[in-house]
Image (cartoon, rainbow, N blue to C red):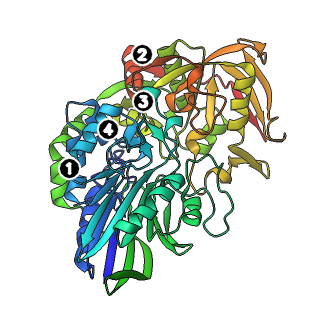
Amino acid sequence: MKITFLETSDMHGYVAPTNFSDDQEQGFGTAKVAAKMKQLKAEANGPVITIENGDFIQGSPLSYYIAKSQHPVAALTAPVNQLGVDAHVLGNHEFNYGLDYLKEAISSYQSPVLAANIVNDTGEPFFGQAYTIIEKEGVKIAVLGLVTQYIPHWEQPATIKGMTFQSIVDTAKVYVPKLRELADIVVISYHGGFEKDLTTGEPTELLTGENEGYQLLHEVSGIDALFTGHQHREIAGVVNGVPVVQPGFRGSFIGKIELTVNTDEGHVRVVEREAALVPVADAAPDEATLALLAPINEELNTWLDQPLGQVQGDMRITDPMGARIKEHPYIEFINQVQMAASGAKISGTALFNNEGKGFGSTITMRDVITNYIYPNTLAVVQVTGAELKAALEQTANYLVSEGGQIIFNPAFIDPKPQYYNYDMYEGIEYTIDLRQPTGHRITSLAFEGAAIGMEQPLDIVINQYRAVGGGNYDMFSADKIIREIQVDMTELIADYLKAHPMIEAATNQNFTVIA
């Protein structure tokens, strides 16, 4: 018998095949996933199990609008329920809108939501269920759900109060032997990825525990299949005898694993394993899925197209890399918004990806939300001059010089682009000299016209993700936060534009990068 597993992960609230910035149909989205999944189920030669691996309720203008409007989150999760999913796993971005919203989302799903390694003070799963067992044609299949343990480094303490996030390796070592007693097949759905090259075993990132997939595959026996996500990578293969998939993001692929099993006198044995990624681009969007959100999409588009302000000059981004090495008016603007909202005299922000187009002559909410893509709030941290310099030295590592040309460090593009971890600051003057050795590239650093002392206290406004150390910025932490601005950045941008309906596309060129 052949058992087919179909996985989605990191769809991030993209239902219709749109990126919300134009009318061109894109090759992703839950509606295309739904159509392709119907096809795959019809073609399957045996039972099918579907798994949704997390990060669905945050990430698109649609998911943002639903979270901030009067619509229930059930309106957003309805398309996933229509997929007929057998099990859900929590992702890290499920926490972004707070615990109450997350609980509302969990209650809206029509199948089990799993998170074995998030436990309460008694050691039990905080969200109630660690695994589910599904029986298909007499074969029992256990699905164990695991989540990246690194969530406390990104979320506000109040959101995760009472939760302990355990290593997925330690958790699997407890659960997999138990599940082998209870089921014939044991698979893991992990909202996390791989910390090492799957072929060579060489680390591909700092070994912080954010991603533990490689260690899991090499230290825990008894796993029949592993479904992953979080890193937005496109992976399909067999690693250490275990079939593995990771299906990109926004619903661009469905991860597919087929296990052929033999049953001999009641004993089930896996005899063949196959892993593949199935693109959905060629599928026509499922009309029933689109219909679920049609009324909200009309509201959404009206909201997205409302004008907020005007630009004098040019604030468009045509060269994302250029905007990182020479201050761009858009970056200057975001830092000015952060400083105005917080009262801090120093601000840091990033150009999150290479898709943002900046602002044209008229700024709409669509422009704001497709450029500033995360539901960040702000925090003011008080640090020393030495800690600020350490942060700048770390951000300098995201740039390298090749033949005199400055490029983004390839080490932070593959396997996952980390453009969001390269920060640019306002309120200080600094120089990054890439000719100098690592750790000594900040060759000048001044505040209000004077060199910054290493013991000098400084108040800096950054997004909450960075303020608690996100991106492995260990010089920042929750205990250094002195105040928070509990308003989403997109709202702060809109409010700033209401107060300043005409903004000037200008920069003060307060930082210099030398190759």
Secondary structure of the residue carrying tag 4 is helix
- The kind of residue on which mark 1 rests is Ala
Which amino acid type is marked by label 3?
Answer: Lys
Expressed as whole percent of the image width and height from the top left, the position of residue 408 reads 66, 48
**Can you say which quadrant of the picture contains the C terminus?**
top right
Counting residues from the start of the chain, the first of labels 4 and 1 encountered is 1
Residue 469: % across, % down: 59, 33
**Distance from the alpha carbon under mark 2 to that under mark 3:** 38 Å
Residue 78: mark: 1
Give the CA separation, mark 2 to mark 1.
39 Å
Say whether residue 262 is left or right of residue 329.
left
Q: Which mark is residue 70?
A: none
Question: Disc 3 designates what residue?
Answer: 161
In terms of sequence position, does the residue under pointer 2 or pointer 4 come before the other?
4
The image position of residue 144, as x and y in percent, is 39, 58
- Judge by depth and name the residue closer to the eye, 314 or 195: 195
Cα–Cα span, label 4 and label 3: 13 Å
